Image (tube, rainbow, N blue to C red):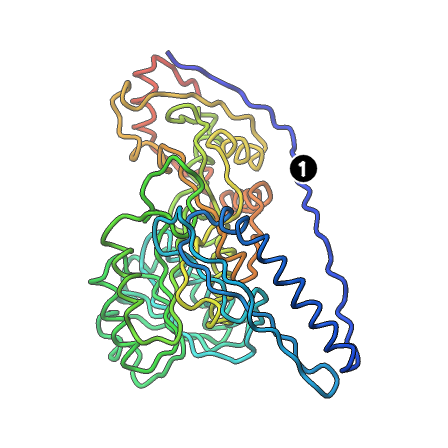
Amino acid sequence: MARSLSMPSGQEKTVINTVASPPLKLLPPHKAHSQLSAMAAATSAFFSVASSSFSHRHRRATLLPSPSLSFSSLSSSSSSISSLPSFGASPLAKSPPFRVSPSGFSVSASSEKKRVLIVNTNSGGHAVIGFYLAKELLGGGHDVTVLTVGEESSDKMKKTPFTRFSEIVSAGGRTVWGDPADLGKAVGEAKFDVIVDNNGKDLDAVKPVADWAASSGVGQFLFVSSAGIYKPTDELPHVEGDAVKEGGHAAVEQYLSTLSFGSWASFRPQYMIGSGNNKDCEEWFFDRIVRDRPVLLPGSGMQLTNIAHVRDLSSMLSLAVQNPSAAAGNIFNCVSDRAVTFIGLVKLCARAAGREPNIIFYDPKAVGVDAKKAFPFRNMHFYSEPRAAKEILGWTSTTNLAEDLKERFSEYVSIGRDKKEIKFDLDDKILEALKVTVTA
C-alpha cells in the first residue's frame, strides 16, 4: 500500500556563529622570551589534557604526529617552541589516518605559482571536478593544462563540461586530448610541478600516470578517489581512517604511498551538484516535480546522504596544491559538511522549483525493482565528513543546498529540460505495483 505525503514549503534558517581571534601583539625581545616560556608551559599542559579528547573526536585515526608551534621574527631576535607532547595512537583505529601537518595546526598557503596537469575523465560526475579545479587554479595564477581522455572529436565532448572548455582556454589554460597511459606523447616536452589524476578508478589506469610523473620529477601527485571506497558501517559518518574495500581506489592510494613524490594525497568525493555536471543528481528530482509526478523514494526516505557543490571539491584540491607539505600523505573526504535526508532533498528541490512535492514511498523488493536503477542515490545511510580537510588544510564548506538548488533549477529551465519529453517507465512500473494512478 502506498503512502502519499505533501510536504510544506516552509523556510529554514541556519545561523553560523564565528568568534574572531584577538590580534597578535609583538613584544620587545626580553618580554617576548618570558611570555613565550609561559606559553610553552601552558601549551604543554593544554595538550596533556586535550589529547584524550582529540583522540576520541578522531576515533578512527591511528597516528597523529606531535605538532609544533613556531614563533619567529620578534623584533631583532627569534624564539621557538618545537617540542610538544605527542597525541599518540588511538586504540580504536581501523586503518591509516589523516595526519596533522608537521609544521603545526596553522597552514600558510604558498604563493609559488605551479605548473599543473589535470588528467580528466571524459564521462561521469567527476569530469566537472577537473573543469572547476582548472578555472580555480588559473584564477590563482597557476599554469594549467587539462588532458582529457580520448579524442576531441568524440561525441562525449558534445556534453558539458567539455562544451565549456573554452572558458579554460580564455583564462589562459591549455586543453589537450590523449591517452593517460602515454602522457609523454600527449603533453610533449611540457614539465609539471603537480599532477591531478581525476580519471583512474584502479591501479591499472593510474599506475602509468603516476610512474610517468615520478620519473619526470613531478613534486606532487593528487588522486581523486571516491567515498564509495568505504565499507558499510553502523558508525556514521565515514571519516578518514575508516575501513575501506580492497583493490580499486584503495590499491591506488597504497601504491602512491610507495613512490618518491615530495607530496601525494587522495581525495574522496561523494555526490555533487554544480553547473556543468553531466551526471543527473538534482535533475532527477526536478524532472518529476515540474511535471507534477510523484517523487518515488525507496524505504522510509530518512536515509542520510551528502551532496556538495563542486566548487567545494575544487577549493579543497586547490588548497592542497597551495600547501603540499600540509597535504602530504593524507586522505581527504572531499565532501560538504552537512548531511541531508532523501525527504529533505525532495523538499529543497521542490522549493527551488516553486512547487509542492508529492512523495510516495515504496519497498524495492516488494515491487520487484532494483533500487540502483530506480533511484540516483544509494538506498542506505551513506555520508562522510570532511574532518581532515578542516583540521589540516583549514578548508571550509560553502555548499548551501537551498540556494545552490535554486541556481541549478534556473539553469535546468534555461536549457529547456523542463519541456523535454522524458520517459518514466520504471516509475510507472513501481506505481502500477503500488496501484497508484498518475493523472499528470
SS for dot 1:
loop
Tell me where residue 14 sits by quadrant: top right
How crowded is the residue under tag 1: few (<14 C-alpha within 10 Å), some, or many (20+)?
Answer: few
Q: According to the image, label 1 marks what residue?
A: 13
Q: Is residue 88 left or right of residue 205?
A: right
Q: Is residue 14 left or right of residue 305?
A: right
67 lies above or below 357: below
Which of the pair 302/364 is nearer the observer?
302
17 lies above or below 48: above
Which of the pair 245/181 is nearer the observer?
245
235 lies above or below 426: below
In the image as oriented, which residue stretches furthest toward the bottom? 76
354 lies above or below 120: above
The residue positioned 49% from the left and 73% from the top of the image is 170
Q: Which amino acid type is shown beneath numbered disc 1?
A: Lys
Q: Position of residue 135 (x, y in %)?
A: 49, 67
The residue positioned 30% from the left and 28% from the top of the image is 425
Q: Position of residue 153 (x, y in %)?
A: 28, 65
Which of the pair 307/123 is nearer the observer?
307
